[in-house]
C-alpha cells in the first residue's frame, strides 16, 4: 500500500461515512429540529409563545398578539471516532476494511448524537409512569400529556421505548395489531421499524437512560421541542461528519479518523414527556 491514500479513496470513504451516519448511525437526529450548517461554537433555536386573537371596534386598532420570543442557546462539542489500520493487516483480511471502519465510525458518532439528545430530553419536567410496569394506560397518559400541552398531533410526534418496554408494549393489542398502527419504515427512521399509534411514531431504542434497570426513561416528544446543531465540517458539502486518513510511517499504519461537532438543547419543555418505568418487569404472558 502506498504511503499516501489516493484523493478519490478519501472522498469515497467520506461519502460512505456520511451516508451510514445519516441512515443507521442515529435514529433521533431526524426527529428533532436540526441545524446542519452551524458556524461557530454555539447556535440558537427560537421558541415563540402562543398568540391570543382579539376583537376590534369598527375602524379601531387591532391589538397585537405580542408573542414572546425566547432564544435557546445550543453549545456544540467536538467528537472523534478513529482507528488504526496496519498496512500488513490489509493483506491478511478478506473483508473490506474501509467499509468496516466507515460503519464503525459513523455508528459511534451516531450514538453520540442520540446520547446528547437523550440527555436534554431527560431534563423535561413532564415525568409520568412513576417507575411502574409499562401499561396501556401509561402510554395513553404520555399522549394525553403532550396533547394537553397543546402540542400538535401533526405527524411529528415520536416515542422511544427500551427493548423491554417495547416487548411489553407488543402485548398491548392496540399497539401490536396492524389495524391500529400506521405505515412502517417511515423515511426519517430508516432501519428503526417504527409503529405509528395514536399519531406517535414509536420505535425501540437501546440508548435510553436506565435501560434494564428499575428506573428507565422512555421518551416521547414533538420534533420542534428539541434542537440539535452541528457544524458543517466538510467545506462545500454541508456535511456534519468529516473523515481524515493519514499515514504514520513509524507505525506502518493508516489512522482513519471520523469527526463531528454538535450539541443538543431543550427548546420547549412542554413538548417532551419522560415515561419512567420499571425495565426489569416481566413480560406479560
Image: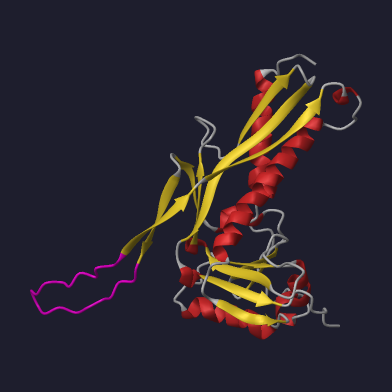
Residue 275 versus residue 242 in the image, above or below: below
Q: Residue at x 54, y 61 (%)?
A: 120
Q: Where is residue 68 in the image (x, y as percent from the top left)?
A: 30, 66
Q: Position of residue 193 (x, y in %)?
A: 72, 61
Q: Position of residue 33 (x, y in %)?
A: 49, 55
Q: Position of residue 226 (x, y in %)?
A: 50, 60
Q: Is the magenta stretch mostly helix, strand or loop?
A: loop
Colour style of the rendered protein structure = secondary structure
Q: For the C terminus, give its image quadrant.
A: bottom right
Residue at the farthest bottom position: 137
| Residue 38 shows in this picture | yes
Q: For the N terminus, give its image quadrant.
A: top right
Residue 23 versus residue 67 in the image, above or below: above
- Please tell me which residue lies in front, 11 or 75: 75
| Residue 188 shows in this picture | no
Q: Residue at x 64, y 82 (%)?
A: 130
- Please tell me which residue lies in front, 89 or 153: 89
Residue at the farthest front position: 250
- Please tell me which residue lies in front, 237 or 277: 277
Q: Which residue is drawn at 64% across and 79% down?
A: 139
Residue 125 versus residue 99 in the image, above or below: below
Q: Which residue is drawn at 78% across and 72% down?
A: 167
Q: In this view, does 272 lie to the left or right of 107?
A: left
Q: Is residue 256 left or right of residue 116?
A: right
- Please tell me which residue lies in front, 19 or 274: 274
Q: What stretch is highlighted in magenta?
A: 49-68
Amino acid at each position: 500500500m502506498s504511503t499516501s491514500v489516493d484523493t478519490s479513496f478519501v472522498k469515497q470513504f467520506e461519502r460512505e461515512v456520511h451516508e451510514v451516519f445519516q441512515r443507521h448511525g442515529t435514529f433521533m437526529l431526524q426527529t428533532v429540529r436540526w441545524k446542519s450548517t452551524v458556524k461557530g461554537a454555539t447556535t440558537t433555536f427560537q421558541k415563540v409563545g402562543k398568540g391570543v386573537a382579539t376583537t376590534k371596534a369598527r375602524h379601531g386598532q387591532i391589538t397585537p398578539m405580542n408573542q414572546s420570543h425566547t432564544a435557546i442557546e445550543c453549545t456544540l462539542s467536538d467528537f472523534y471516532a478513529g482507528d488504526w489500520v496496519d498496512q500488513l493487516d490489509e493483506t491478511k483480511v478478506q473483508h473490506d476494511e474501509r467499509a468496516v471502519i466507515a460503519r464503525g465510525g459513523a455508528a459511534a458518532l451516531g450514538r453520540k448524537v442520540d446520547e446528547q439528545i437523550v440527555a436534554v430530553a431527560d431534563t423535561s419536567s413532564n415525568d409520568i409512569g412513576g417507575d411502574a410496569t409499562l401499561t396501556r394506560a401509561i402510554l395513553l397518559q404520555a399522549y394525553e400529556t403532550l396533547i394537553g400541552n397543546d402540542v400538535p398531533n401533526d405527524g411529528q410526534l415520536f416515542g422511544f421505548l427500551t427493548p423491554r418496554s417495547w416487548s411489553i408494549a407488543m402485548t398491548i393489542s392496540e399497539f401490536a395489531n396492524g389495524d391500529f398502527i400506521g405505515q412502517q419504515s417511515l423515511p426519517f427512521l430508516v432501519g428503526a421499524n417504527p409503529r405509528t399509534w395514536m399519531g406517535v411514531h414509536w420505535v425501540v431504542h437501546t440508548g435510553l437512560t436506565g435501560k434494564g434497570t428499575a428506573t428507565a426513561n422512555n421518551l416521547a416528544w414533538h420534533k420542534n421541542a428539541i434542537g440539535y446543531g452541528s457544524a458543517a465540517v466538510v467545506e462545500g458539502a454541508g456535511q456534519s461528519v468529516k473523515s481524515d486518513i493519514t499515514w504514520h510511517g513509524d507505525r506502518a499504519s493508516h489512522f482513519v479518523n471520523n469527526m463531528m461537532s454538535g450539541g443538543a438543547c431543550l427548546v420547549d419543555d412542554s413538548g417532551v414527556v419522560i415515561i419512567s418505568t420499571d425495565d426489569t418487569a416481566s413480560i406479560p404472558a
